[in-house]
Structures are given as C-alpha cells and as structure tokens.
C-alpha cells in the first residue's frame, strides 16, 4: 500500500514539475520574444506605414528598382545576398510583411489585395516611384501578381520563383486527401509550428532554419524563427486567407504587357524529392505534371511570359541557385 501511495505521490510531483517547466518555458519565450521585437537591428530600418512598423532594407540606386517579396516560412534576410549583388546595378528593396520578424502585425485579414495595398503604401513611404521589377517567391509570387493587376503602370517586369499559383485546387484531383494534406497543403505543418513557437519549444531547440547564411542574417533568422507572431502571420496568410487571395486574383486578373518570368526547380529532382517522402513514381509524376501545367497557365497572364528551369532542385532557389535569379533579374532591369 505504501509503495502504491509513494508511486502516486511521485507521479503527481512529476506532473507538477512538467507543468511548471512548461509555464517557465512559455514565460521566458514571451519575455525574450518581446525584447527581440523591440530591438530591430541593422542593416534594415523600421518604416512607419499607416502607424504600423515595417522592417525594410533599401540598397543601391537606379531605376527600375527591384522589390522582393518573400515566401511563408521565410524572411527578407534570406534574400540579402541576392539583394547585395543586384544593388551594384540598381535600387533593391526587401521587407518583411506584417507580423513577420520585426514588422508589426496587421489588425485585419492578410488577403492578397490587402498585402498588395500595403506594399504600395510602403513604396510610397520610401519614395520609390516609377515601374519596378517584382520578385515573388512562393506565396510572394501570388502577391506580386496581385500588385501588378492593381498597379500595372508601376510594374516593369515580374520574376516568380517557384510560386504558389491560383491553380492549387488541381492537386486535389491527382492525389489522395492524405497526400494532399501531408505534402501539398501546409496548413497542418504551420499549425504544428504555431503551437511549438507559442510554447517556447522552438526557442528551446535553438533552431537555425537556414544554415547557408552567415553574419547578421544568420542571427536574425534564428531569432525570427522562434517568434510566435511570425507563425501567426503565416497562419493568417496561408491557412486562413490563401483561398480568398486566390479568389481575388481570379477576379482581378488581366493580361499584362510586361514580362513575367517563372523560375522553377528541376523537374526530375522534384520527382525524386516527392519519392523520398514515400510517393510512388506515378504519384510523383502526376504532381509534377499538375505543377508544370499550373506554371504554364500562370505565365499566360503576360503577353511575354516564359518559364526558366533551374538545374537545381528544392523550393528555395534563392539559396540553391542564386546566380540564375540574379542573372534573370539583371536582364530585366537592363531591358
């Protein structure tokens, strides 16, 4: 009887200590995150846009300027290496959208139209006038197109880097619901990251999401990746409002007169990557075929659209094949 009672007491103490540890971890994460968000670091600066703080970095000089829109699960410092290289040619602007990193969260839903409007207000605030070259990565590609449809005279050209397209629904037609949820759709993954970031677990692990950057960008990315507010922003844009953003583009779309260049990963490498997740060759090939068709339809938004295939695999071509992106953007700036 004493043994059973002792085991019961021990289990209660263990449970109490676990709960206490979780509370301490949560509290520490809140404090550290708050301190980090209050102390933006160079080389970027905070710009006030409609009484909301936006972290922005502007380098170089010249026209047309280049404006880079990052993906979800990404931040502007990932693009600083490319920004620095392009700055020898013209002015280049990177920024973090509302809620990401040091940029203040928006009080309203993050739909494509709203994000395009926020970008226009930012460009006005930093006195970037005249047509610019938009570079959109992933979901940033959707927002680049939305901006171009709303402000066609302010766009010189568009570069889409492995973008999310308005044809996402097509994937449901060729894969099972399980494959769609676990591989194509990022909703569950983002929700897991939100929980881990709010609890402080990501900060505890001290994860560096991007290992092939150095210096200030590396430290910034490590700390940004632990911010619960960043994952809340991703959840807002993707899980809650992606469908609405797609509907808005479908309503606003038009044929653009400016070039739209879509840079995609190597198809064979992508198929190999899908198979590494347990898909059969047939399943992987069907997904790649849908993606290829969606890309072909996306460049039809321009009278001068084309697809460039990278020799590298992976979604993050700004890290695996930066030379191709720099070469492509540079040719458009000189155009």
Image: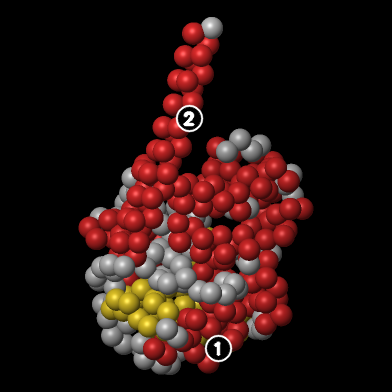
- Visible residue check, residue 267: no
SS category of the residue bearing label 2: helix
Q: Residue at x 37, y 68 (%)?
A: 102
Mark 1, residues whose alpha carbon is within 10 Å: few (<14), some, or many (≥20)? some
Q: Which is more toward the observer, 58 or 154?
A: 58
Q: Name the side, left or right, on which 319 lies relative to 9.
A: left
Gap in angstroms between the C-alphas marked 2 and 1 = 57 Å
SS at badge 1: loop
Which residue position holds label 1? 151
Q: Is residue 52 left or right of residue 178?
A: left
Q: Does 170 sit above or below residue 54?
A: above
Q: Left or right? Give the position of 27 relative to 180.
A: left
Q: Which residue is mark 2?
A: 15
Q: Depth check: 313 or 100 in front?
A: 100
**Image coordinates for residue 227, horizontal then vertical, percent:** 41, 57
Of the numbered discs 2 and 1, the one sitting upstream in the chain is 2
């Amino acid at each position: 009887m004493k043994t059973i009672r002792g085991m019961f007491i021990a289990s209660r103490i263990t449970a109490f200590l676990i709960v206490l540890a979780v509370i301490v971890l949560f509290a520490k994460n809140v404090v550290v995150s708050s301190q980090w968000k209050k102390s933006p670091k160079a080389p970027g600066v905070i710009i006030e846009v409609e009484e909301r703080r936006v972290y922005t970095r502007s380098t170089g000089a010249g026209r047309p300027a280049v404006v880079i829109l990052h993906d979800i699960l990404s931040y502007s410092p990932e693009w600083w290496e490319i920004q620095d290289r392009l700055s020898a040619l013209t002015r280049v602007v990177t920024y973090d959208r509302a809620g990401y990193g040091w940029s203040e969260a928006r009080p309203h839903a993050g739909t494509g139209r709203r994000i395009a409007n926020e970008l226009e207000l930012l460009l006005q605030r930093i006195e970037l006038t005249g047509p610019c070259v938009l570079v959109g990565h992933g979901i940033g590609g959707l927002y680049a197109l939305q901006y171009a449809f709303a402000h066609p005279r302010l766009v010189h050209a568009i570069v889409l880097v492995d973008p999310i397209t308005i044809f996402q629904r097509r994937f449901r037609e060729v894969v099972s619901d399980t494959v769609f949820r676990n591989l194509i759709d990022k909703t569950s993954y983002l929700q897991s990251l939100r929980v881990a970031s709010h609890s402080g677990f990501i900060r505890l692990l001290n994860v560096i999401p991007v290992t092939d950057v150095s210096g200030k960008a590396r430290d910034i990315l490590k700390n940004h990746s632990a911010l619960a507010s960043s994952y809340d922003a991703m959840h807002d844009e993707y899980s809650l409002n992606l469908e609405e953003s797609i509907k808005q583009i479908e309503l606003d779309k038009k044929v653009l007169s400016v070039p739209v260049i879509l840079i995609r990963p190597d198809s064979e490498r992508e198929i190999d990557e899908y198979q590494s997740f347990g898909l059969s060759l047939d399943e992987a090939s069907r997904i790649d075929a849908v993606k290829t068709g969606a890309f072909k339809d996306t460049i039809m938004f321009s009278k001068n659209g084309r697809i460039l295939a990278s020799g590298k695999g992976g979604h993050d071509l700004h890290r695996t094949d930066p030379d191709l992106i720099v070469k492509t953007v540079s040719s458009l700036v000189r155009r």
